[in-house]
Image (tube, rainbow, N blue to C red):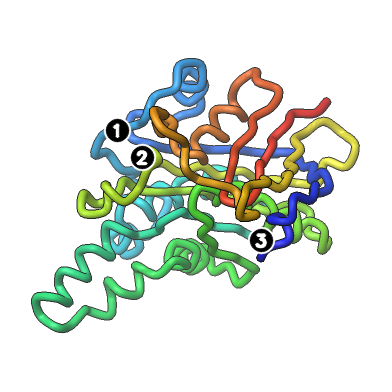
């Protein structure tokens, strides 16, 4: 059982956001996102970033999920390379479903599409494009993906790195999986370049264990309730762009709390 399941309170994790970028269909620049944060709604549409800053061969290999992530990373890259954390709740699900159907029909899967469906494929494409041999991590943690990405980034900062780029991204679910997922889903990506905040202004992330009869936090929203209108990672982005001072999010074992601190 993870330590956080024992109803213990975590230390405060403070950081600053040095640069940010986000992309979703219909929301392609900072002004659009700030307006969205005032009246948020689930993004929808078929658009995808063009990625003119990347080589043609890479653009041809990248589906929309990868394109969204690559676009936002490009906007927050600094002159000096730094570690990167890539975090997606489900990854290349659309590509994977196509491959599974191909496997069921033909008994084979082409190695090219398979290599681009693995969870670190976006990180690999970005590092190849920039000849970047530095540290990157790819992770997935369902509805707590954004929180665990920040925890990973703060661990890298604690090891002595000056900055870390965190990219959180997801794609709409294939229809065959829709009935198995309670929370809202959307196509989006956002990137933050984070640094240590020490005692200065920034953000804090804390967690407290959830106590239930079996010792685990419950994901059941209860009778009569409705899933939140936004995926958890988009709620966090809205909090970042809004005037709200805090945001709490119940995960599988703990309650995460984001705070803005002066």
Residue 72 coordinates in the image, percent (x, y): 49, 44
Under tag 3, what secondary structure?
A: loop
Would you name the residue on which mark 1 appears? Answer: 44
Q: Look at 41% across and 48% down and name the residue there.
A: 170
* Disc assigned to residue 10: none
Estimate the x, y position of residue 129 in percent, counting from the top left: 47, 64
Q: Where is the C terminus found, in terms of image quarters?
A: top right
- Along the line of sight, which residue is nearer the eye, 113 or 216? 216
**At 27% from the left edge and 53% from the top edge, which residue is drawn?**
177
Mark 3 = which residue?
83
Q: Earlier in the sequence, mark 2 or mark 3?
A: 3
What SS does tag 1 mark?
A: loop
Most foreground residue, 167 or 72: 167
Q: Distance between the residues labelled 1 and 3?
A: 31 Å
244, 176: nearer the viewer = 176
- Crowding at label 3, few (<14), some or many (≥20) Cα neighbours within 10 Å? many
How far across and how far down the image is residue 204, in percent?
Answer: 76, 38
Query: Residue placed at 82% from the left, 43% from the top?
Result: 12
Q: Which callout, 2 or 1, points at the residue further toward the start of the chain? A: 1
Near mark 1 (Cα within 10 A), the count class, few <14, some 14-19 or many ≥20, is some
The residue furthest right is 199
Q: Name the residue under label 2.
A: 186
Which of discs 2 and 3 lies nearer the camera? The answer is 2
Q: Which of the 4 quarters of the picture holds residue 199?
A: top right
For image coordinates 79% across by 54% down, the residue present is 162
State the CA–CA distance, disc 2 to disc 3.
Answer: 27 Å
Would residue 28 be seen by someone viewing this image from the given angle?
A: no
Mark 2 and mark 1 in contact? Answer it, CB < 8 Å.
yes
């Amino acid at each position: 059982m993870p330590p956080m399941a024992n109803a213990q309170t975590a230390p405060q994790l403070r950081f600053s956001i040095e640069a940010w970028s986000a992309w979703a269909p219909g929301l392609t620049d900072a002004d659009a996102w700030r307006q969205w944060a005032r009246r948020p709604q689930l993004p929808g549409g078929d658009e995808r970033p063009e990625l003119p800053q990347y080589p043609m061969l890479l653009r041809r290999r990248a589906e929309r999920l990868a394109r969204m992530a690559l676009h936002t990373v490009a906007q927050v890259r600094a002159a000096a390379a730094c570690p990167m954390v890539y975090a997606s709740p489900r990854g290349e699900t659309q590509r994977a479903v196509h491959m599974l159907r191909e496997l069921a029909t033909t008994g084979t899967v082409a190695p090219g599409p398979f290599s681009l469906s693995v969870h670190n494929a976006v990180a690999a494409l970005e590092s190849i494009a920039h000849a970047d041999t530095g540290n990157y991590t790819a992770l997935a943690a369902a509805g707590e993906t954004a929180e665990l990405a920040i925890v990973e980034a703060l661990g890298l900062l604690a090891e002595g790195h000056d900055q870390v780029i965190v990219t959180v991204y997801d794609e709409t679910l294939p229809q065959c999986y829709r009935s198995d997922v309670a929370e809202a889903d959307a196509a989006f990506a956002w990137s933050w370049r984070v640094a240590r905040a020490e005692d200065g202004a920034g953000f804090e992330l804390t967690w407290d264990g959830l106590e239930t009869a079996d010792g685990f936090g419950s994901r059941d929203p209860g009778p009569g309730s409705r899933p939140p209108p936004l995926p958890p990672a988009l709620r966090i982005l809205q909090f970042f762009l809004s005037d709200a001072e805090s945001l709490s999010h119940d995960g599988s074992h703990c309650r995460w709390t984001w705070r803005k601190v002066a």
